[in-house]
Amino acid sequence: MNETEPNQPEPSPRRALIAPRTIPGNRAFAWFGAASKLVRLAPGAWILTMLTWFVLILVAKVIPVVGLLFDALTSQIWLGGLFIGCAVASYGGMFHQKFLFEAFSSHLVPLALFSAMMTGIELTALHLIVGPEVWEIFLQTVSQQQQTSAAQEIPPEMFNQIVAARMWVIPINAVLMFVPVLVVLHNLSLSQAIKLSAKGFFANPAAMLRFFLVVAAFAILALLSFGLTLVILIPLYIAAIYFAHLDIFTAEESSNDGQWQA
């Protein structure tokens, strides 16, 4: 993973797909090892990109209705751009803040549809577990002026139900975590990417278990740091998914020390 000079052309991030393969479970730790090396190549660029992302989301939320739609339709597009950045950086290019916006021009429609799909799944889970009352809260939070009071009016029992509903969505997010990277780096259709992501996930239960144990540790660390470590933990998570995709869906694999080899 050597950086190229800024004026040199960035290498192609595309690699040929293969049928999802089953890999040793401990390979999951190599994904995070490779992710750490990738992020360390340009830590400042990654941190600046994360801060830019957070600010854009916060600014959008200030605008009633528009903020909710913005969040619902763009969540996966940001990820797609960052996966492109991971690919370019891992093959000798340089990671830039611009990659945050890359998928808006290259894969806007499929990733916007996928973002809407994931939002719909979460809303459906909330409706099934919490009940119709969740829509009253949703309509109240559309107005920025009512967000604080709406949150205060949620009964403890309903709050627990909302948390439970979102917990049910986590496994779906896990199964589909490869969809954005498969769309942007391999030009798969949304339906193809969904099917392939699910196949790759279920073909590797041991590796996926270890992967999400590390992610759980990341979540605990983020809570203990009051979210301050997210500017590093999110890049590590995204880059680890990128390297996992290389391991499972392409003819490239990692050695035990996290170095990626063709």
Image (spheres, rainbow, N blue to C red):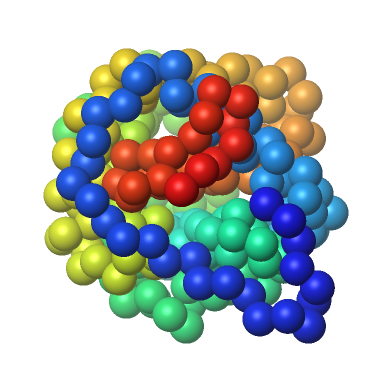
Residue projecting furthest to the front: 262
Expressed as whole percent of the image width and height from the top left, the position of residue 28 reads 46, 25
Query: Is 186 on the left-hand or right-hand side of 41?
Result: left
Q: Is residue 170 above or below residue 24?
A: below
Left or right: 172 as drawn, with respect to 88 = left
Which of the pair 74/144 is nearer the observer? 74
The residue at the point 46 percent across, 62 percent down is 80
Occupied quadrant, residue 117: bottom left
Q: Residue furthest right?
A: 44
Residue 183 position within the rendered picture, expressed as x and y whole percent measured from the top left: 32, 64
Q: Residue 105, how many percent across, how many down?
A: 47, 83
Q: From the viewer's perspective, is residue 143 above or below residue 167?
A: below
- Residue visible at 80% across and 73% down in the picture: 5
Relative to 121, is 255 on the left or the right? Answer: right
Q: Nearer the viewer, residue 98 or 242?
A: 242
Compare residues 239 and 68 and report the one nearer the observer: 239
Q: Is residue 75 above or below residue 129?
A: below
Residue for point 39% across, 39% down: 247
Q: Quadrant of residue 49?
A: bottom right
Above or below for 210 versus 179:
above
Q: Is residue 215 visible?
A: no
Name the residue: 68% across, 36% down. 36
- Count of residue discs: 0
Image location of residue 254, percent across then percent down: 49, 35
Residue 254 visible, this angle: yes
* Left or right: residue 22 compared with residue 7: left
